[in-house]
Image (spheres, rainbow, N blue to C red):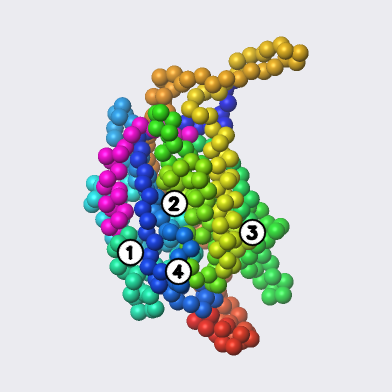
Amino acid sequence: MRDSQFKYGRCRAAAVTVDITPPKNMYHRMWGAALHDQAAGVHQPLEVNLLWLKSSATAAVDTDVLLLSVDHCLFWAADLEPIKQSLSAATGLDPEQIVIYFTHTHAAGLMDSSRAELPGGELIAPYLAEIGEKVSVAAAALPDSLEEMWLTTNSGHCSLAQNRDYWDEANNSYVCGYNPLGAADSTVMVIRLCDLEGDVKTVVVNYGCHPTTLAWDNELISPDYVGPMRRTVRQALGEIPVVFIQGASGDVGPREGFVGDVAVAVRNGQQLGLAALEALAAMPVEPAEFSYDGAVVSGATIGTWSYKPFLSEQITSMSRFESMQTSFDLEYRSDLGTREQTQQELDALLSTGVDANGGADAARDQ
């Protein structure tokens, strides 16, 4: 019998981290309830972590995929496409071979070049152009660093993510907030990439949880919990790229969130980082097959297991590397109102609001 907890793969890989922290007075609007337009400073740097994966040297066909994990909530298509085209031109990869993930932090401002007339908005377009240049230069250099690596996967659990669909009885409606009775997926997926000498070169962490620790009261540029998660992992494994892939987090967020205190984001990130490290620490030092050896009578009858090196044909099978994209349509949920109905409900809610904060509520509605 063999243990199937861990999955293994072989390919060539290279990774790098790029700092994309914007100017501290950058446009910082993301929350309607915020009373500031521009950031007042920086909590932790924003990063892009790039990972180039390429089929092994012995493969019959070369397959390349470039992954980027970007510390922003999102870029609209008009702003994202030039960055992707720049990456394609710099690397020679087709745009379809370039996959850009957003960590989805809500504490870095909405980078929309059409907001140039707003305070700090004039910095957005030059900043986006700078990101495109930085990541393109970094990506173009990665092929020179490609080396054969082992990929080892494992899963763990973290209770950071909690259901955020709460029924507010006073308002007779759902709110986006912590629901202690709701369900949430706690799964953390990790991939460790090691060279053939066993040195850890990069780590991929996949977890579904909205990075909404920090909200309207926060005036600092921040990667939210994702940054402290990376720092926690690096404190244990060294200054390696940590590629965070945000999971399906539509109805989940941190138990303690929507605050202005960055210390809460640090705690949330440490919680996820430690969970990722637990899943990584469970991995064998070297990829190998863990299988049952047999019984040993020692008072009790003991079942013994041990690691055995993979056979050459197993390694060949693990070195199969392919990339595939799939798109499909989803039906619109029948229990949701139309856009017109939603707008009417929003207008009605705003019209019943009472300004008890000396104009603050009115400002937040703008």
Amino acid of disc 3: Arg
Q: Which residue is mark 1?
A: 128
Q: Which mark is residue 328?
A: 2
The mark nearer the N terminus, 3 or 1, is 1
- Is residue 120 among the parts visible in the rendering? yes
Measuring from the top left, give residue 282's x and y in whole percent: 57, 34
Q: Would you say 299 lies left or right of 229 here?
A: right
C-alpha separation, residue under disc 3 versus residue under disc 1: 32 Å
Residue type at mark 1: give it: Leu
| First in residue order: circle 2 vs circle 4 | 4
What amino acid is labelled 2 in the image? Phe
Q: Are marks 3 and 4 in contact (CB under 8 Å)?
A: no
Q: What type of secondary structure mainly makes up the magenta span?
A: helix
| Residue of label 4 | 41
Q: How many tags in the picture?
A: 4
Tell me the CA gap for discs 3 and 4. 26 Å
- Magenta segment: 132-152
Q: Secondary structure at mark 2?
A: loop
Return the residue nearer the eye: 101 or 323. Answer: 101
The amino acid pointed to by label 4 is Gly
Which of marks 2 and 3 precedes in the sequence?
3
Q: Secondary structure at mark 4?
A: strand
Q: Nearer the viewer, residue 63 or 104?
A: 104
How packed mark 1 is, by other alpha carbons closer than 10 Å (few <14, some 14-19, many 20 or more), is many
Within-10-Å neighbours for mark 3: few <14, some 14–19, many 20+: many
Does 328 sit left or right of 277 as displayed? left
**Residue at screen point 76% across, 13% down:** 299
Identify whether 313 is placed above or below 278: above
- Tell me the quarter of the image containing the N terminus: top right
Pick the front one: 266 or 226: 266
